[in-house]
């Protein structure tokens, strides 16, 4: 007689267990000749019973953890054939988590002034039939709150008038929570806090420092020019200095060949600006050169 299953608690659905719970699968069966029983976990043999003496048999799981999550089923087989139980997926009740195990928990977004943006969190998963709460915070103020039983993602559209530097999305249920953090970097064209003087009168042999103070986002690129020719940073590495928003060009032991127009170009993705100065000899120096005392 082919094997038969009289009853079992293998159900074709997900079953949710708490951390530390105990659970037993129970199987009643019959058949002639007396069947063999094989229990499977994620399609791999967990245990086999050869000619078991009694029906029912049981599989007990004590102190349930995430390692026990998976699909369980049993096969009852003899020489006349076989039958299988439903496949039951055991799941650990958990707080929300990201689908990608390598997912970072924050991102930096560059935006233009007055730009409306749409923020999207990475795809998440929940091992729980219970509702999930999604809360968006701007600084410490709740801007949006929603509930969903099987959330995969969430988004927030923010008008420029509401934008803050730090925005947080919190996803939580009764078993835990996860947060995702956005940092907004506002793009800004470069602008000078300190420009070059229009003209600079110097003496021969003097050490000259041309200094600018400039800001912008992204951090601007700075290039110095002499008579419209770019000064090579490698050639002038001891004379050109960049320190956050302060940039300088140093001319040591000023000579006649250093007379001319000096300019600086400052640029980022948003704009390019320039400042220029003309370096000239002081009148007393000119008189000495042409023989006047």
Image: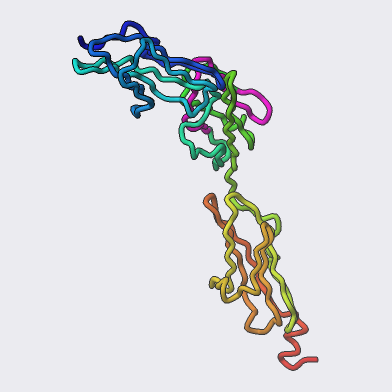
The image quarter in which residue 31 lies: top left
161 relative position to 32: left or right: right
Whether residue 111 is visible, yes or no, is: no
| Residue found 59% across the figure and 47% down from its top | 188
User: What x and y, as percent, mark residue 235?
Assistant: 57, 76
Residue 153 % position (x, y) = 48, 26
Give the tally of numbered discs.
0
Membership of 47 in magenta stretch: no
In this view, the residue farthest toward the bottom is: 291
Residue 266, visible in the rendered structure: yes
Q: Is residue 119 magenta?
A: yes
Quarter location, residue 272: bottom right
Q: Quadrant of the C terminus?
A: bottom right
Considering every residue shown, the one lying at the far top of the view is 6
Residue at position x 72%, y 90% from top? 289
Pick whichever, 238 or 52, lies toward us: 52
Q: Residue 103, relative to residue 133: is it above or below?
A: below
The residue under the point 59% across, 42% down is 186
Quadrant location, the N terminus: top left
Quarter where residue 78 is shown: top left
Q: Position of residue 60 (x, y in %)?
A: 47, 18
The residue stretch that appears in magenta: 117-143
- Residue 196 position, x and y percent, is 68, 64
**239 to the left or right of 101:** right
The chosen color scheme is: rainbow
86 left or right of 133 in image: left
Q: Closest to the observer: 158 or 55?
A: 55
**Residue projecting furthest to the front:** 53
């Amino acid at each position: 007689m082919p094997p038969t299953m009289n009853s079992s608690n293998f159900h074709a659905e997900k079953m949710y267990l708490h951390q530390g719970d105990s659970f037993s699968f129970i199987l009643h069966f019959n058949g002639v000749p007396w069947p063999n029983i094989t229990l499977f976990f994620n399609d791999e043999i967990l245990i086999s019973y050869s000619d078991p003496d009694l029906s029912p048999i049981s599989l007990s799981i004590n102190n349930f953890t995430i390692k026990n999550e998976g699909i369980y089923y049993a096969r009852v087989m003899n020489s006349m054939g076989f039958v299988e139980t439903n496949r039951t997926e055991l799941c650990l009740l958990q707080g929300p988590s990201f689908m990608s195990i390598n997912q970072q928990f924050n991102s930096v977004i560059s935006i233009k002034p007055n730009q409306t943006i749409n923020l999207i969190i990475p795809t998440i998963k929940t091992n729980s039939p219970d509702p999930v709460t999604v809360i968006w915070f701007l600084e410490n103020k709740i801007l949006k709150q929603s509930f969903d039983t099987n959330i995969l993602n969430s988004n927030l559209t923010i008008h420029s008038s509401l934008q803050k530097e730090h925005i947080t999305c919190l996803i939580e249920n009764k078993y835990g929570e996860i947060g995702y953090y956005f940092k907004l970097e506002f793009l800004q064209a470069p602008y000078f806090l300190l420009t070059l003087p229009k003209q600079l009168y110097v003496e021969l042999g003097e050490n000259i420092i041309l200094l600018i103070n400039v800001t912008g986002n992204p951090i601007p690129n700075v290039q110095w020019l002499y008579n419209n020719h770019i000064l090579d940073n490698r050639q002038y590495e001891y004379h050109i200095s960049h320190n956050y928003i302060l940039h300088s060009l140093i001319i040591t032991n000023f000579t006649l060949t250093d007379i001319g127009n000096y300019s600086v170009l400052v640029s980022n993705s948003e704009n390019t600006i320039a400042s220029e100065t003309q370096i000239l000899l002081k009148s007393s120096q000119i008189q000495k050169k042409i023989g006047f005392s």
